[in-house]
Image (cartoon, grey):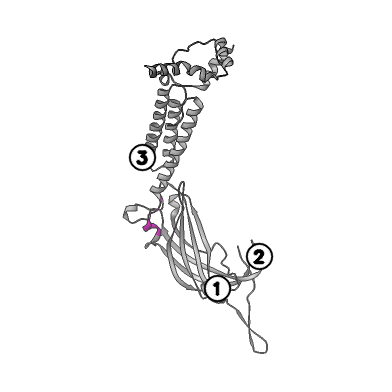
Amino acid sequence: MVLMNTLTSRLSAWSGLVLSVLLFLCSAVSFLTYPSPSTLKSLNPRANLTVTSVETILGRQRWSPNREEQEFVEVRFDLATDLTGGLAGQGGRALWTWNTKQVFLSLVASWDSVDPRARGKGGIRKNEAVLWDRIVQRREDARVLISQGNKYALREVGKRWAGIDSANFTLHWNVMPHVGMLAYGHEATTGAIPIPARARRVRQLPNGETVEEDEEVRRMPY
Amino acid sequence: MSAMLDQVKGYFEGKVDFQGQRLADRINQEVLVMGALLALFVGFAFSSLQVMMLIFAAISAVDFVLVVPAWPWYRRHQTKWLPNIPRSDADEAKATGEQGKSVDEVEKEPLLAAAEGKKAR
């Protein structure tokens, strides 16, 4: 039994119990609303992610301290998915609960590249870069129907994409609750999409020879 | 003036008796735990975290009013203290000072004498 003889000790006992009970309430809510294992591990069969065009360009970044000339990959994609959940019992995805504060969607490109420093993994380094993202704060905004290019630059560490054959594109989601643990999962993925070589201009010299030249260095919007 | 200050101090101390403490502890625990469960169920029913927190805050405030101030129902069973046996200071000084004993030894003398009396019999 807690000491309750004076006003201050009753005040202390009351506030201590309020905080302990509040802790219990918040953990109960977070246990009840954490996504189920099936939601966490599965892909959504009704989501549609297709990559319509991939292009490699020589360019220079505008809004970055790194203003070097490097190769950028411009990707145009179509994404159609419904993450509002609908009725969870009918196979909809239960991402939106009474404990969901916001959902973060990101389209991630992942590829392998040769790295002599990655000795433990056979010289292969795994790379991931976010092309597009959306912070969904209202349930209605979780219906995604877009057809656009990448929002962020897709660059390689080695500044050239010549050594990389293809990349996979996956849509990741991340549920941020009001109370509780973060939950991560994938929604849809494409297979390996080949990355083309950079297009070079072919010019004919006056003496009949042809010369391959780089196109002009483009100023990228990111 | 000092009597009024003592009364004010009494209000701020808010002392209650032992039965009152048990009652206050019980009311505190039961109201808060049941209030939390109620808040959880109602919040689940309305699918709103805000509803749950508001209900719990309201019940906590009610519990504060019920438990923290020194209400009269916490003072119903006052402890009955035994009457004080008056002992003059002169007697105490004589008993301890002359024979070099402490106050506790002097107070135990009648009890020891009664015990020896029983043994003799």
- The numbered dot on residue A119 is 1
Q: Where does the C terminus of chain A fall, quadrant-wise? A: bottom right
Does residue B38 belong to the magenta stretch?
A: no
Q: Is residue B95 above or below residue A163?
A: above
Where residue A135 appears, as percent x and y from the top left, is 50, 54
Q: How many marks?
A: 3
- Residue flagged by tag 3: what amino acid is it? Phe
Q: Which residue is mark 2?
A: A66
- State the SS at label 2: loop
Tag 2 and tag 3 share a subunit? no
Cβ–Cβ under 8 Å for marks 1 and 3: no
Q: CA distance from mark 2 to mark 1?
A: 28 Å
Where residue A127 appears, as percent x and y from the top left, is 53, 68
The residue located at (39%, 34%) in the rendering is: B35
Q: Is residue A211 left or right of residue A104?
A: right
Tag 1 and tag 3 share a subunit? no
Residues rendered magenta in the picture:
A34-40
Q: Nearer the viewer, residue B84 or A76?
A: B84
- Residue flagged by tag 1: what amino acid is it? Arg
- The numbered dot on residue B41 is 3
Q: Nearer the viewer, residue B113 or A192?
A: B113
